[in-house]
Amino acid sequence: MKVKEKQNMVLSGYAMSSGLAKGKAFLYQDILQRDHELYDITKHEVDDEYIRIEQAIKVVIHDLGLTADRIEEELDKDSADIFHVQKAVLCDPSLLNEIKKELCTELVNGEQIIKRVFHRWERKFREMEDEKFRQRADDIVDISSRLLRELSGIHAHILEDVPDGSILVAKRLLPSDTVFLSRKTTVGTVVEFGGTGSHAALLTREMGIPAVSRIPNLLKYVSQGDVLLIDGFSGSVIVNPDEKTENDFKNRIKQLDISRKKQLEHCFETAKTLDGLTIQVFANVGCREDVQHAIKNGADGVGLYRIEQFYLSRKNPPSEDELFEEIRQSLLPLEDKPATIRLLDAGADKEISFLNMPFEQNPFLGRRGVRLLLEYPDLAISQMRALLRLSKEFNIEVLVPMITLSKEMYEMRKLMVIEANDMGIDKLPLLGAMIETPAAALCAKEISEHADFLSIGTNDLTQYTMVAGRENPLVSDYFIDEHPAVQKMLHIVMRDIGKTPISVCGELAGKVNAISMLLEIGVRTLSVAPLLVPKVKEIIKQTSTM
Ligand code: PEP
Ligand code: MG
């Protein structure tokens, strides 16, 4: 679309993460989804075309080396190994021979050859018996994307290389993509697909990055470098604004900063309702930076520590020592403030590549959360031992994800006791259950008999109550966490659990209109994205439960 035609164009979507942002569009397009040009070449052109492919391979090998070095410096050697393995694949002579042969027989351009050969290799790996080789299939896909990007001259794809102050524009963001998001480089995101309960939405909210989703044909209207104004309150995006629109928007950003500053001035005060009830406002975190952010924003502690980040994009699970060190470092700023750390909630959309997980027709209704932990006890044991060690130094509680049966809590407690005995620890941290399935909500009483505390995850509870996948944009109209059906679930839980301590840690806990309802039904602890803590405290102070 011509630049002139789209000046001041307003694109309407859905508010995924609140806030306002101005920045330059950075297009993130999954290269494999693009239609690549197809053209014939003659026999005389084969050598030149092969040289073009060889050059692309050389550049990709070089880039993989740089990425491996950087990842090793920032994360660890295991994570960096992924890229070393990819380098080795690209140096495999049988692959290069196959490319050359295909080029000679098919006589089409390099992009098409790469797509075909790598697709074949991917299938070959996927069908292998040995799990280690099956996992290699993802590497093949990744390498072919890199090669295609190089051949097509598209360098502005890798999320690691997003320039500072960008607005990320993408068809969709997967949980593994979001690992690369950083507040410094990404001031906002706009996606074509993505529900409000998706992990991309959660992560952007947690990072305080305004985001808008569900703009049809987004990539048709936005080009690389366009200036975008995104409004994460109304869910709209303005493309290449004129001077007046831009100035008005900048004023709104200023006003927002002023009111945020005001909230921040009071964020360290205790949140007391008008009728004098003290409400604890905790933060949901996923890494070291989040904890620092939570503290700066006045969080009373950490209500949900998601540890999935330590497992994604790895070839091997982190060891007990690694987990201990990583989590320990991140908890240091908390001093004696409490932290609830959730055991790994893998499965469904949070796929862990090193687990030998059989194909499941419907992984959201399959082996995830605690079901996987019970299936892979080694995984659970390393986490439990790391947390038990941490409990000597920090005020921590352990939370079990995706409970459906009270028996699962019984099993997890047994595991905790065995490991604690083995380690000579007699003061066990509290063990809690996530209430995020209808079964758990309806049987919260039975579950509470095996749990020291409960935490309601309204995101999954909404997904399973409303039968609307949180990552599925086609049903996001059904994903309504404020729906009476979800509220009824919450009522039942609060009615049935007696004096068992309970918190709400799903997105609903940070919603302006839901807070008074939650307080009315008896919730006294909320856990929200770090950036929302000051605002939630302000709302509580203006609310009465009488
Ligand atoms: C939830 O389901 O509400 C929750 C807090 O867990 P997650 O969003 O990590 O699935
Ligand atoms: Mg959940």
Image (cartoon, rainbow, N blue to C red):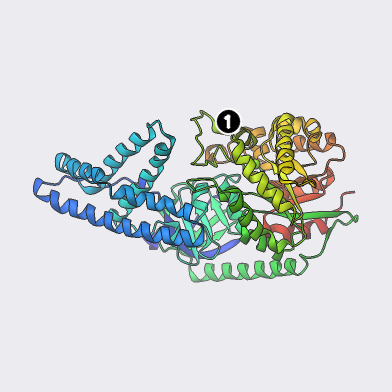
Instruction: Tell whether 346 sits left or right of 541.
Output: left
Tell me the crowding category of disc 1: few under 14, some 14 to 19, or many 20 or more residues within 10 angstroms, Cα based: some
Residue 505 in sight here: yes
Residue tagged by mark 1?
Answer: 366
Q: In this view, does 184 lie above or below 279?
A: below
Q: In this view, does 453 lie above or below 220?
A: above
Residue 33 in sight here: no
Q: Residue at x 69, y 62 (%)?
A: 332
Q: Which amino acid does label 1 sit on?
A: Gly
Q: Residue at x 60, y 46 (%)?
A: 196
The image shows residue 371 at horizontal and vertical percentages of 63, 33
Q: For the residue with label 1, is its CB less than 8 Å from the closest atom of ligand 2?
A: no
The image shows residue 282 at horizontal and vertical percentages of 74, 55
Quarter-of-image position of residue 477: top right
Q: Is mark 1 on a helix, strand or loop?
A: loop
Q: Residue at x 86, y 53 (%)?
A: 544
The image shows residue 93 at horizontal and vertical percentages of 24, 46
